[in-house]
Image (cartoon, helix red, strand yellow):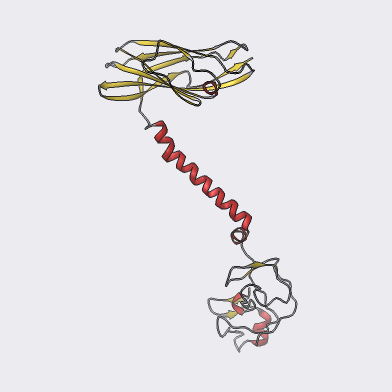
Amino acid sequence: MAQAPAPTKVSPLWRCPECGHIFTPQPKTIRCPQCGENLRKCRYCQYADTATWECTNPRIRYTYGDELGRFRIPEPDHVWACPENRPALAPNPWQLFVANPLLRALGWGAGVAVGLLLLFRFAILPWVRGPEVPESALLMGQAVVPSQVMLGEPIRLTVTLWNNEQAPVHQWLLVLEGSLVGNSETPQITPMPITPVERMKDRLRVFLPGSAPGQGMTVELVFQPQEMKRWVYTLRLDAYGYLGVPPQLTAYRVFITPSRKVQVQVR
């Protein structure tokens, strides 16, 4: 018959192995307050060797053991008023996390956020940007951007493109994105693009006439910020050349110097 053992030092928290309920026990706690499971079973004690179903407590082995000093637990669910009972029911950090509704909600929220980010990165972003294209060392570009301009002055960007391939470039594509694009009117572009400029928030796509083998072209873009304020604008520039026989054209990424990413400070 199970009886309450003598008051002992207990863990700050117990987790019922039957229903998973986590609670703060009292020195005389015997049963789980949620499901009624007896938590003083020998199998829950820190001295129980569940591989051999023997007690490892020296005092119990000396007092109640056989001639070899062994005290065998008759059944896995054996219960008795053991004076040395020490339930090993302290929950681990993960069990505490799962049991806390707020942390569990935060964990679910973080998991959903990570899932959405992965979906955007590997599903939506490639669809928006299109497939990656190979870079051609024979299609070269050079961007000239002022590092500083005075307040009120337009920001002039010059891009020179060279076609060193043996085939003609049927058309060039400039892709510009960053805070300079997002905070400026649609720029004035020379020469005139062959199609209307495509704009999506802080991103521009500009299609320009192509170049014959061994020839190039210079493109000038003039940005006028919408608000006259001192600021540091960022810009990323990518260029592509379309080679091949129409209508099956292949886009190749242009090798740009000195850098694809620039900053312009308005003073």
**Residue 210 appears at what percent x and percent y?**
33, 14
Q: Quadrant of residue 77?
A: bottom right
Where's residue 234, x and y in %?
A: 55, 22
Q: Nearer the viewer, residue 153 or 144?
A: 153
The part of the image, by quadrant, that contains residue 151 is top right
**Which quarter shows the C terminus?**
top right
Q: Up-down: is 67 above or below 116?
A: below
Identity of the residue furthest to the right in this view: 7
**Above or below 237: residue 6:** below
Counting from the top left corner in percent of width and height, residue 84 is at 69, 79
Left of 213 or right of it: where is 59?
right
- The residue positioned 56% from the left and 85% from the top of the image is 74
Quadrant housing the N terminus: bottom right
Residue at the (60%, 21%) spot, across then down: 232
Residue found at the far bottom of this picture:
67
- Point 70% across, 76% down: residue: 29
Residue at image location 45% in from the left, 43% down from the top: 119
User: Position of 189 compared to 152: left or right?
Assistant: left
Q: Position of residue 103 (x, y in %)?
A: 62, 54
Q: Is residue 110 above or below residue 224?
A: below
